[in-house]
């Protein structure tokens, strides 16, 4: 095959090529309207007032908007921008933008650049076709976008011009959140309030705000673009619906952490350079487990900025690949039988003074703080395991979670042997601060040293403590960080408040601080330790043990999604003013609908490919064999061809039901009837792939897509 790999040379990549020679640190953040740029360009008092607003997490004073807009416009025009957009994250799971020109007519036939404070802080896109989950009737199609000054504006370059992107929130005209950003910001506020309350009780009066942080590791595949365009399934659904396994022995290729092929490296460097310009602190790159699979990871940032940046990572990755004759696949499971792609969500809580609440630290006091917040996370995850699982649910994830390559669908916490021993000791009383021999004795360096990378030793856990943060490993490679982190922050806020209530009661009853904290940690750990598990998450024994412990095992998306509307979930979202009941229900409906629509499209695509590409190939093969009278081979091919045809009819029959059933019933039907029918077609098709002549087979093979770099 005439693959793009053969055509590609470094000279082909003219766009932005001059920058390829510049060290990354020279370009970092050059396309961002960062605090440093703001300081240079804004009047001093405006800059100070804006920073103060941001530090305190307060609402923006509109009187600042005009001054900021004017400075932003000048900066953007100097950078070559012709248009601006409110850049937002509707509930489609991706980003949206509607471009407006800076230029307006002056009346004398000329045009001048215009951009006011009003245009900066509020937009009104025609939003009628974004998903709303029934929140907004179509006759009230208005939606508003509102500037999020905590996430800096940036410039997206294009060979023919540049675009100023203003990160914004997206609401209905009634003020309900129609995006992933608003709830995330609300949850960060809720967590900050609860954590500050906890810190005050623990005797820390200095921090004024607590920020949650995320570092997201992104896995992805790269394949040659020619193969992509020859595979309607990849184009339409993001994954291969057919494809026989490559011959054994291919996997001996030492791909994981192996040297990176030149074309791929050139792609990575280009992608990273663009992301660096956008202020995304990309740090690591390497080959992943599967052939053709790679990973990119940035340094952690404040949650809402990290979530915005994660969308930029996915966007730049996808847009850059064609420059190198490649396509980046972000689907969770592009190839059956081959490792899928996830997105590890490293999460912690940090103070405005730079402290990390999940870092054990060196002093007895730091250890008390750590134990308090760590115990709160254990409680939060135990009490809301189903919800957390639901945030990682989508149609692609059903091929991955629990499939011996990703964490199981059972949410459990890995603490590492050392930390688990500490909690066990506290529970059993060995960790009593009043007993002098105990390692939690006052005045002694309390916790034994915990290895920073202790958590890395167990890759089978969905929620692992990794030294100074928790790593939620169940998220899928195509997913937005928004909902998962909204949930993490909200349930952590609730648990921190619960621990704070307990601590307050003990202190008021006259108990000393260290003893009270230890007592609270003992009670909380004891009540929630069923979620702590250090063994092999992939083993069948864990499935059994988890069931015995009463942990939920929500295997598929339709099993998991109803957790989102469980009464205790709605009540925690409402209590912390993160999502109203209506906003929660809207999300549930949208997620169910997306699952149903995507499966339906997969089934139709599978049937069409089978009928119009695979069946004709099988028939041609059959004719060839009949022409030379190879009877045994004719019989074999004929039987498979008939089987294929029957399987196609069965799939078409099952997929016809669509539309007549209610939502949850509908997706359950798709799961239980349409997926097996699709697999039925695939099974025969993959057998045919192994016997049909190479020149007749219509689809690129796994061995070509995965191994040609
Ligand atoms: P690994 O061994 O998994 O590669 P690293 O220490 O390199 O672990 O971190 C992986 C990710 O975790 C990176 O994105 C890193 O920035 C992020 N991370 C580190 N500290 C924190 C933190 N306090 N909060 C959130 N993410 C963090
Ligand atoms: Mg990791």
Image (cartoon, rainbow, N blue to C red):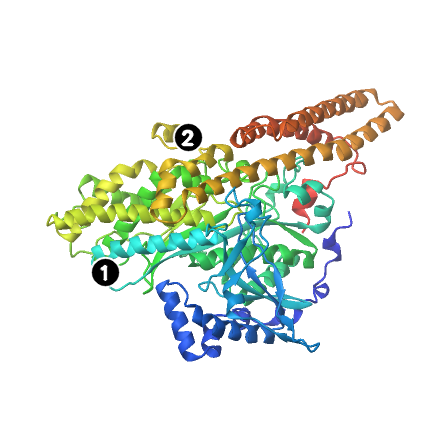
Viewer-closest of 324 and 625: 324
Q: Which residue, given by chain and number where applicable, does mark 2 sit on?
A: 543
Is disc 2 placed on a helix, strand or loop? helix
Q: Position of residue 602 (x, y in %)?
A: 64, 36
Q: Position of residue 540 (x, y in %)?
A: 44, 29
For label 2, being within 8 Å of ligand 2 is answered no
Is disc 1 placed on a helix, strand or loop? loop
Marks counted in the figure total 2
Residue count near mark 2 (Cα–Cα under 10 Å), binned few <14, some 14–19, many ≥20: some
Q: Position of residue 420 (x, y in %)?
A: 29, 43
In the figure, residue 110 lies in which quadrant? bottom right
Relative to residue 277, is residue 198 depicted above or below?
Answer: above
- Residue 171 visible in this rendered orientation of the protein: yes
Residue extending furthest toward the right: 627
- Residue 297 visible in this rendered orientation of the protein: no
Residue count near mark 1 (Cα–Cα under 10 Å), binned few <14, some 14–19, many ≥20: some
Q: Position of residue 158 (x, y in %)?
A: 65, 65
The residue that appears at 71% across and 42% down in the rendered structure is 232
Q: Which residue, given by chain and number where applicable, does mark 1 sit on?
A: 204
Q: Is residue 201 left or right of residue 35?
A: left
The residue that appears at 31% across and 42% down in the rendered structure is 379
In the figure, residue 188 lies in which quadrant? bottom left
Q: Nearer the viewer, mark 2 or mark 1?
A: 1
């Amino acid at each position: 095959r005439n693959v793009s790999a053969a055509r590609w040379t470094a000279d082909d990549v003219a766009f932005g090529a001059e920058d390829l020679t510049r060290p990354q640190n020279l370009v970092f953040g050059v396309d961002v309207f960062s605090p440093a740029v703001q300081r240079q360009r804004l009047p001093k008092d405006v800059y100070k007032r804006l920073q103060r607003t941001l530090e305190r997490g307060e609402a923006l004073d509109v009187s600042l908007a005009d001054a900021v807009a004017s400075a932003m416009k000048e900066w953007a025009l100097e950078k070559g921008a012709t248009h601006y957009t409110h850049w937002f994250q509707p509930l489609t799971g991706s980003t949206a933008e509607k471009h407006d020109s800076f230029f307006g007519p002056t009346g004398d036939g000329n045009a001048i650049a215009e951009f006011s404070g009003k245009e900066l802080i509020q937009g009104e896109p025609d939003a009628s076709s974004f998903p709303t989950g029934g929140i907004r009737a179509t006759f009230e199609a208005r939606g508003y976008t509102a500037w999020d000054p905590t996430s800096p504006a940036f410039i997206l370059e294009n060979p023919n011009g540049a675009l100023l992107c203003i990160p914004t929130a997206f609401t209905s005209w009634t003020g309900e959140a129609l995006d992933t950003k608003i709830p995330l910001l609300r949850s960060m506020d809720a967590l900050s309030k609860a954590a500050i309350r906890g810190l005050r009780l623990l005797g820390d009066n200095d921090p004024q705000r607590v920020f949650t942080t995320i570092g997201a590791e992104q896995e992805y595949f790269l394949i040659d673009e020619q193969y992509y365009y020859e595979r309607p399934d990849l184009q339409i659904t993001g994954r291969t619906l057919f494809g026989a396994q490559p011959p054994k022995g291919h996997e001996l290729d030492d791909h994981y952490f192996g040297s990176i092929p030149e074309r791929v490296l050139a792609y990575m460097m280009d992608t990273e350079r663009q992301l660096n310009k956008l202020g995304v602190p990309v740090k690591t790159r390497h080959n992943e487990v599967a052939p053709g699979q790679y990973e990119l990871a940035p340094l952690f940032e404040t949650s809402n900025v990290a979530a915005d940046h994660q969308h930029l990572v996915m966007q730049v990755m996808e847009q850059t690949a064609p420059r190198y004759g490649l396509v980046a696949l972000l689907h969770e499971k592009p190839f059956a039988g081959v490792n899928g792609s996830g997105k590890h969500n490293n999460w912690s809580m940090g103070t405005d003074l730079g402290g990390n609440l999940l870092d054990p630290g060196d002093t007895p006091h730091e250890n008390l703080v750590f134990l308090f917040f760590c115990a709160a996370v254990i409680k939060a995850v135990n009490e809301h395991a189903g919800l957390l699982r639901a945030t990682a649910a989508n149609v692609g994830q059903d091929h991955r979670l629990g499939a011996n390559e990703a964490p199981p669908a059972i949410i459990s916490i890995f603490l590492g042997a050392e930390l688990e021993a500490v909690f066990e000791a506290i529970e059993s009383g060995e960790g009593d601060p009043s007993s002098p021999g105990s390692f939690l004795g006052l005045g002694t360096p309390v916790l034994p040293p915990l290895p920073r990378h202790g958590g890395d030793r167990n890759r089978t856990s969905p929620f692992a403590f990794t030294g100074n943060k928790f790593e939620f490993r169940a998220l899928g490679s195509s997913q937005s960080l928004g909902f998962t982190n909204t949930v993490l922050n909200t349930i952590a806020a609730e648990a921190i408040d619960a621990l704070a209530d307990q601590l307050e009661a003990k202190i008021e009853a006259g108990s000393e601080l260290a003893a009270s904290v230890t007592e609270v940690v003992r009670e909380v750990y004891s009540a929630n330790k069923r979620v702590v598990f250090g063994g092999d998450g992939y083993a069948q024994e864990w499935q059994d043990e988890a069931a015995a412990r009463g942990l939920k095992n929500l295997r598929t998306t339709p099993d998991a999604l109803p957790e989102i509307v469980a009464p205790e979930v709605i009540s925690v979202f409402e209590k912390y003013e993160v999502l109203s009941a209506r906003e929660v229900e809207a999300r549930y409906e949208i997620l169910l609908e997306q699952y149903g629509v995507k499966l339906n499209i997969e089934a139709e695509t599978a049937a069409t490919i089978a009928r119009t590409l695979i069946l004709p190939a099988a028939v041609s093969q059959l004719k060839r064999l009949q022409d030379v009278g190879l009877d045994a081979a004719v019989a074999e091919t004929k039987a498979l061809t008939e089987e294929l045809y029957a399987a196609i009819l069965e799939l078409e029959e099952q997929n016809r039901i669509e539309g007549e059933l209610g939502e949850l019933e509908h997706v359950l039907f798709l799961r239980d009837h349409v997926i097996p029918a699709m697999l039925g077609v695939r099974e025969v098709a993959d057998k045919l792939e192994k016997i049909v002549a190479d020149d007749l087979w219509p689809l690129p093979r796994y061995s070509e897509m995965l191994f040609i770099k």
